[in-house]
Image: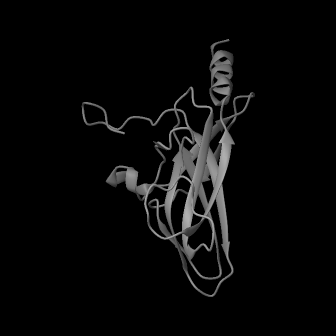
Amino acid sequence: MINDKGLPEPYGNGIIAKIEVVNPSPKDIAFFDLRAFYPETNLNVHLLTKRTMLDKYRDKTLWRAIESQEGNVNLMELTIPDTNYGIFKANSFTRFHIVMFPDPDAKELLLSFKVAIKAKFIKDQFALTGRKKFKHYGMAYDISSWTESLQQSEQSEKE
């Protein structure tokens, strides 16, 4: 994110989910429409991909720092997707960390993506387009209390 002076600013508080996909097929499988959204309104939530980062940071390693109660900092490397579409290579295992930035008062969040395999019966109920039915995968998250843990950690830092 860029401020009014053209300088990068922190993204702020967010939620991290992990997607792990095994493609045992001898063929590559394309995925698309990777999105996080509110199910009540079907409005997208900003999620971090390399495409949404500034050019000069796209090839840098992204880290998540977790501070323990003892004050130690543990680092975890994040693997974020290049874009909201891509390829699951044949005979592969793919892991993405999805970093999302929901509103502080949000109650529920859905994370989903489609693969380029025709679905026989079920169409994504949140899809707005009239295109063909594709297999889709997703997960609903109850995030009604996600900011409570942030407030608790901020309060303990002040003490």
Of all residues, the one furthest to the top in this rendering is 159
Give me the residue at 35% from left, 38% from top.
Answer: 8
Give coordinates of residue 5: x percent, y percent. 24, 31
Give me the residue at 43% from left, 56% from top.
Answer: 50
Of all residues, the one furthest to the left in this rendering is 5
Give me the residue at 46% from left, 43% from top.
Answer: 46
Task: Name the foreground residue: 15 vs 74.
Answer: 15
Of all residues, the one furthest to the bottom in this rendering is 26
Task: Name the foreground residue: 134 vs 67.
Answer: 134
Of all residues, the one furthest to the right in this rendering is 70
Task: Name the foreground residue: 96 vs 41.
Answer: 41
Give coordinates of residue 81: x percent, y percent. 50, 60
- Which quadrant is home to the N terminus? top left
Rendered position, 73 above or below 23 = above
Give coordinates of residue 33: x percent, y percent. 48, 60
The reply, left or right, for residue 125 in relation to residue 91 is left
Q: How is the image coloured?
A: one colour
Rendered position, 137 above or below 24 = above
Q: Tell how many labels.
A: 0
Give coordinates of residue 82: x percent, y percent. 45, 61
Q: Which of the 4 image quadrants contains residue 114?
A: bottom right
Give me the residue at 59% from left, 51% from top.
Answer: 111
- Which quadrant is home to the C terminus? top right
Rendered position, 7 above or below 105 = below
